[in-house]
Amino acid sequence: MVLTSYGRSSGFCIDPIEKKPLNHFLPGTPVLSFGTAGCNLACKFCQNWDMSKSREIDTLADQALPNDLADKAVSLSCRSLAFTYNDPVIFLEYAIDVAQAAHDKGIKAVAVSAGYICQKPREVFFKYMDAANIDLKAFTESFYKKICGGSLQPVLETLKYLKEETNVWFEITNLIIPDENDSESEINDMCQWIVENLGCSIPIHFTAFHPDWKMQNHDHTPAQTLKKAREIALSYGIKFAYTGNIIDENGNSTWCHNCHKMLIKRRYYEILEWHITQNANNEATCSNCGTRVEGVFEANHGDWGTNRVPIKIMM
């Protein structure tokens, strides 16, 4: 087998880390994002279908070897590199080499993945990742089979592996599609599984669907559906539940699960207020009650805001 996408990308961009989405990993900092072409799932709703479904080598218009990417991240003051747009498990060798080069320069590695991967490559891949967002697309086998051409169980195994066997900071995204995976019973089942298998501290992002690729006959996700999903997650004891792809101050912001004071006020990806302090053990805590806030935080947040800047690596 030959990885024909090694060193080639469908584009590079500096994003806010919150766009991945990661709300508890170096908030406010810029991340150098890139992907290649192709995917190991066939989601009918794919919102990056021009890259993930492409089999054309012309899609891979930009070139960059691992050291080039690491050097560029440093020169642009990015705190991390993200493998995204299409699933990095299909360019595993390239992603690992980039992660190693990034680590040599003090840059973190972030995987944005559906988590659909077998045991052995899973162990190899996540050994080199510092953070991940796992796209838990639904909580039924029928959805994965009919809509994604895959299976739910490997994704659940990935989530349990990350929690039990690694130090990777990870968050979960659930894209809610009207009439497909939006029932309250399914969201209840998913939240119950998360609490029982992953605990209460893993953030979950309920994000809005917009019609795309082969599912353009579906409606946009109502904001109220996302807000209800967030309420359900909180009712199960999940500490950090978010709404995404909509403007929602409560759902975009981070709240202390103990005293219920706002920790990070956000408008979409922009940080407006910061009420997190560091304790004597360099742990992030609520500035009001001192309760620990799980994640990877520093004393001060970044100020990248909502900027999204396409870049070239090789001139």
Image: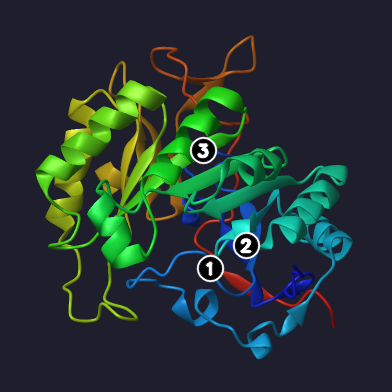
Amino acid type, residue under disc 3 in the picture: Phe
Secondary structure type for disc 3: strand
Left or right placement of residue 24 versus residue 243 in this view:
right
| Residue 173 percent across, percent down from the top left | 38, 49
Left or right placement of residue 160 versus residue 248 in this view:
right
Counting other residues with Cα less than 10 Å from the Cα at mark 3, is it few (<14), some (14-19), or many (20 or more)?
many
Query: Residue at coordinates 75% horizontally, 51% vertically from top-left?
Result: 96
Which is more foreground, mark 1 or mark 3?
A: 1
| Residue 207 percent across, percent down from the top left | 31, 55
First in residue order: circle 2 vs circle 1: 1
First in residue order: circle 2 vs circle 3: 2
- The residues bearing labels 2 and 3 have C-alpha atoms spaced at a distance of 19 Å
- The residues bearing labels 2 and 1 have C-alpha atoms spaced at a distance of 6 Å
Which is more foreground, mark 2 or mark 3?
A: 2
Residue beneath disc 1: 39
Q: Which mark is residue 170?
A: 3
Secondary structure type for disc 2: helix
Amino acid type, residue under disc 2 in the picture: Ile
Seen from the viewer's position, the closer of residues 97 and 256 is 97
Seen from the viewer's position, the closer of residues 18 and 289 is 18
In this view, 178 is above or below 252? below
In this view, 233 is above or below 106? above
Circles 2 and 1 in contact, beta carbons < 8 Å: yes
Specify whether residue 180 is in view. yes
Query: Residue at coordinates 62% horizontally, 62% vertically from top-left?
Result: 90
Counting other residues with Cα less than 10 Å from the Cα at mark 2, is it few (<14), some (14-19), or many (20 or more)?
some
In this view, 92 is above or below 105? below
Counting other residues with Cα less than 10 Å from the Cα at mark 1, is it few (<14), some (14-19), or many (20 or more)?
many
Q: Quadrant of the C terminus?
A: bottom right
Residue beneath disc 2: 90
Amino acid type, residue under disc 1 in the picture: Cys
